[in-house]
Amino acid sequence: MLSLTLWQWAWITASVFGAGIVRGIAGFGFSLITAVLLMFVFEPAWIVPVILLWEIAASIGHLPFIYRQVDWRSLGWLSAGMLLGTPLGVWLLRFMAPGPMCALINGTVVILALMMLRGASLRHTPGRCGTAGIGMLGGVINGASANGGPPVILFFLSSPAGAAVGRASLIAYFLLTDTWASLICWQQGLFSLPSFLLAASMLIPLGLGVALGSRVFRSIEEARFKRLVLLLLLLVASAGLVKSLC
């Protein structure tokens, strides 16, 4: 799997670096971007476990700086739902055809981005059952695509708590979800030595991208950074949706 051309290596490096910048700014978006861009090179069942490893590395690097801002109460109920939903998502990854899966993933991202661009938000934080339900849906999507769970992104970014708390909570949530999904992928035999080699080879571009994005986050207005990130995600997901339908 690592016998790639120079242009493919360049594409992978640029994708990881660019997605890392978005991850550093918003706390999410890395999986959404890389899952779309790298499916031009790899099959979903091969690249998704690698993306999970990159997400874990990014979250571990982030967490010490945002620990105190995390909404741990909501995170607990979301995580409970995620634990139930992720195995179903991994099962879908193994047995669902790549075309319909990519269309479902990218279509979900397009709908989510449009909703948030139109100002979708929560007036009140949902109760325990509602929060766990959102976590379960996010777990299914994360296990099937490593795209970060769009329902949970909407939950936190539309929360009355604000962007800083939402961003920190997403980073902590993704560390839990991606670790859980990685363990299930391991049990299902989806990891291989080339998977770990590719993941390790991109740690420097990933780290540089996340560091640059975090720096941008500290200097940009809340409304502006949300809109810029959502427009980028909408563009990438739309391209992936067109490709999966052709």
Image (cartoon, grey):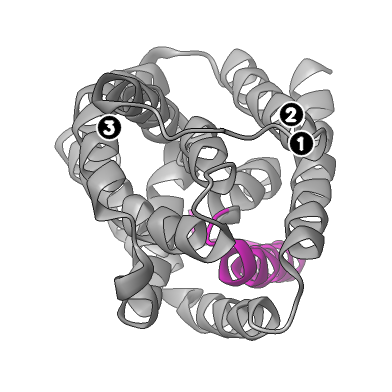
The residue indicated by pointer 3 is: 82
Q: CA distance from mark 1 to mark 2?
A: 7 Å
Query: Left or right: where does residue 237 sit relative to residue 131?
Result: right
The residue singled out by tag 1 in the image is 119
Residues 159 and 67: in front is 159
Task: Tell me the mark number nearer the camera, choosing from 3 and 2.
Answer: 2
| Residue 3 colored in magenta in the image | yes
Check the image and name the residue furthest to the front.
123
Mark 2 residue element:
helix
Q: Which range is magenta?
A: 1-28
Numbered label tally:
3
Residue at 32% across / 24% down in the picture?
136
Q: Quadrant of residue 101?
A: top right
Work out whether residue 197 can be spotted: no
Label 1 and label 3: CA atoms lie apart by 26 Å
- Give the amino acid at mark 2: Met
The answer to which of marks 1 and 3 sits earlier in the sequence is 3
Seen from the viewer's position, the closer of residues 106 and 188 is 106
| Disc marking residue 71 | none
Mark 2, other Cα within 10 Å: few <14 / some 14–19 / many ≥20: some
